[in-house]
Amino acid sequence: METEKYSLGPSAAPMYVPDPELLALQKRQLSLDLEQRERAEAEFQEQERMKREARKQGALSMQRRHEIELSRQANCAHQHPLGGGTGVRGQRDHHRVVMWVCQYCGKDWRGNDLPIHLRPDMSIVGGPEN
């Protein structure tokens, strides 16, 4: 009995023969789907390339700005232009460490890093004195 169940006798379903037009339509649809996926992948890759390029250009721009800032600070005398004394001002923090900043170029020093000839009168340094 078991063998009859699996035999291909007269009750077996007829073999399906696909329509050639249907096969052509399916093939065309698959090729269109493939083209669409390839276009989407190419677009994604182009977007990623543009993002990498933008990051690279941003990093180069920041590096150029930093080099310009360092050059400006190196060429600054940190003095008032008309000979009125130092152009550096300071502020004490809660540990009484003074942060010094040039008013003209933005260069900063911490504590005793500031050269003595640039130090202003300590009475005008802000922050806690004790």
Image (spheres, rainbow, N blue to C red):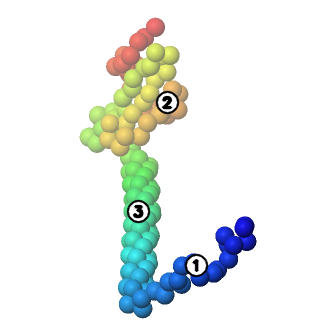
Q: Quadrant of the N terminus?
A: bottom right
Q: Residue at x 46, y 15 (%)?
A: 94
Q: Which residue is mark 3?
A: 51
Between marks 2 and 1 in the image, the one whose residue lies nearer the viewer: 1
| Badge 1 element | loop
Q: Amino acid at mark 2?
A: Arg
Query: Residue 89: which quarter of the image?
Result: top left
Q: Amino acid at mark 3?
A: Lys
Q: Which residue is mark 2?
A: 110
- In three-dimensional space, the C-alpha distance between marks 3 and 2, rounded to whole angstroms, equals 38 Å
Specify few, some or many for label 3: CA neighbours under 10 Å numbering under 14, 14-19, or 20 or more.
few
Q: Which residue is mark 1?
A: 12
Q: Amino acid at mark 1?
A: Ala
Give the percent coordinates (x, y) of residue 81.
Answer: 28, 42
Residues 38 and 108: in front is 38
Of callouts 2 and 1, the N-terminal one: 1
